[in-house]
């Protein structure tokens, strides 16, 4: 053995090698004695409670599948067929009929009224005369009035404004501006600059700044420090007296108990599934041995021989007799139809007479006739063609 074999494995290595498969599957790190104590009783109680629920659930699932297979699927297919083959064509036909009636009653009359009454009347009774009046009367009249106003009114007024009013207005405007500044601007500027600003600055702003800097700022810092200290103390007190016990209770009592209950419910649900399947297989075996097997024996040993006897002794002879009877009836009907047909033919001959047989008509004796007016086609080979004469000309 080598030195490597003689070395004792470390605890970490031993845990990695053996701890994974030695620990239980549902083991949670940090489980205390409370989880180990309540695990088995909780699982027993949960199994006893869950087994009836799981069996009822499995029965409901089987009933639901049976109802879906036997009732809902055929009903859905039937409803789909009815909707596709009946309701949809009827709805489309009714929609098309309603659309046609609606167009015939409410669309085409208004379209025809608009197209053939309103548009021609408005176009030729209003628009065309108005356009003609505008182009032929109002436009030349407006041009003439504009020319008169421009040359008789605008030009003289413009000359008077430029040559007389503009120089006079500049002087008057300058005098009015100087007077307005002297009366309404400079006194208020002097009042603001030399009275209001010094009074507000040294009577209000400087004392307020000193009070804020020397009194309010230190007072606010002290209040803030005191408030922070009180808040930190309150937080520490609440954390120590309320949060820590609640966290401990959740971590070491509620979480293990809840985890064990959830694990117990899962295990119980699986166990209840196995129990439910076992009960179902037992009920299936019992139903098969009490109902299915006797029914199959009765079908094979009683119904099948009786059915074969009825088929061979009664049904096949009756079917063969019916076939022979049908063949005889069809032959009799065919003979009767042929007899009636022959009697009808004889009665017709007795009343009308025998139809005349067709006879061959001999052609005129002489030269061979030329068919088609040429020498290519003749009735008699080697004979000279006779000229064509129509029947009326022959007599």
Image (spheres, grey):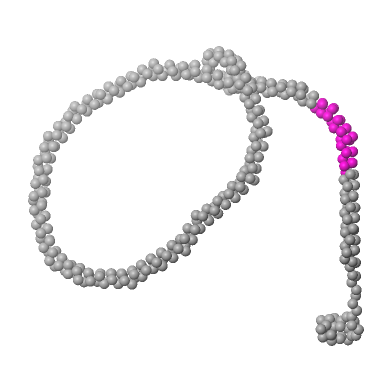
User: Can residue 18 be seen in this snapshot?
Assistant: no
In the image, residue 309 above or below residue 33: below
In the image, residue 392 above or below residue 12: below
Report the span colored magenta.
296-323
Q: In this view, does 340 lie to the left or right of 11?
A: right
Q: Closer to the camera, 93 or 3?
A: 93
Residue 304 drawn in magenta: yes
In the image, residue 368 above or below residue 16: below
Q: Is the magenta stretch mostly helix, strand or loop?
A: helix
The residue positioned 36% from the left and 70% from the top of the image is 132
Q: Residue 111: percent from the left, percent from the top?
A: 48, 59
The residue positioned 25% from the left and 26% from the top of the image is 221
Q: Is residue 147 left or right of residue 242?
A: left
User: Can residue 186 be seen in this snapshot?
Assistant: yes
Quadrant in which the C terminus appears: bottom right
Q: Is residue 244 left or right of residue 142?
A: right
Q: Closer to the camera, 394 or 381?
A: 394
Q: In this view, does 267 lie to the left or right of 152?
A: right
Q: Closer to the camera, 111 or 277?
A: 111
The residue positioned 12% from the left and 61% from the top of the image is 169
Q: Residue 250: percent from the left, percent from the top?
A: 47, 19
The residue positioned 85% from the left and 27% from the top of the image is 301
Q: How many marks?
A: 0
């Amino acid at each position: 053995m080598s030195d490597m074999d003689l070395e004792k494995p470390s605890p970490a290595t031993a845990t990695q090698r053996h701890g994974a498969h030695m620990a239980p599957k549902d083991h949670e790190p940090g489980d205390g004695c409370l989880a180990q104590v309540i695990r088995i009783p909780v699982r027993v109680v949960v199994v006893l409670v869950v087994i009836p629920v799981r069996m009822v659930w499995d029965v409901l699932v089987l009933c639901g599948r049976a109802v879906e297979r036997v009732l809902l699927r055929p009903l859905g297919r039937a409803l789909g067929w009815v909707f596709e083959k009946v309701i949809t064509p009827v709805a489309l036909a009714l929609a098309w009929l309603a659309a046609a009636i609606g167009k015939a009653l409410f669309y085409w009359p208004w379209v025809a009224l608009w197209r053939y009454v309103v548009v021609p009347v408005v176009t030729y009774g209003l628009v065309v005369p108005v356009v003609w009046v505008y182009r032929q009367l109002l436009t030349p009249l407006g041009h003439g009035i504009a020319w008169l106003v421009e040359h008789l009114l605008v030009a003289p007024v413009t000359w008077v404004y430029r040559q007389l009013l503009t120089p006079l207005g500049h002087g008057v405007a300058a005098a009015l501006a100087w007077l307005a500044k002297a009366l309404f601007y400079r006194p208020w500027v002097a009042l603001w600059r030399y009275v209001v600003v010094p009074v507000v600055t040294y009577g209000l702003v400087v004392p307020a700044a000193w009070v804020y800097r020397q009194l309010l700022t230190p007072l606010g810092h002290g209040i803030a420090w005191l408030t922070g200290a009180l808040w930190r103390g309150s937080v520490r007190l609440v954390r120590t007296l309320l949060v820590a016990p609640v966290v401990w209770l959740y971590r070491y009592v509620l979480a293990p108990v809840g985890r064990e209950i959830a694990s117990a419910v899962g295990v119980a649900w699986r166990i209840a599934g196995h129990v439910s399947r076992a009960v179902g297989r037992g009920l299936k075996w019992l139903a098969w041995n009490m109902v299915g097997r006797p029914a199959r024996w009765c079908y094979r040993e009683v119904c099948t021989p009786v059915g074969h006897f009825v088929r061979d002794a009664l049904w096949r002879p009756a079917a063969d007799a019916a076939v022979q009877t049908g063949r005889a009836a069809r032959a009799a009907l065919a003979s009767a139809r042929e007899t009636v047909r022959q009697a009808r033919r004889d009665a017709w001959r007795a009343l009308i007479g025998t139809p005349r047989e067709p006879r061959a008509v001999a052609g005129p004796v002489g030269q061979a006739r030329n068919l088609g007016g040429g020498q290519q086609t003749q009735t008699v080979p080697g004979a000279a063609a006779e000229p064509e004469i129509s029947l009326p000309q022959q007599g």
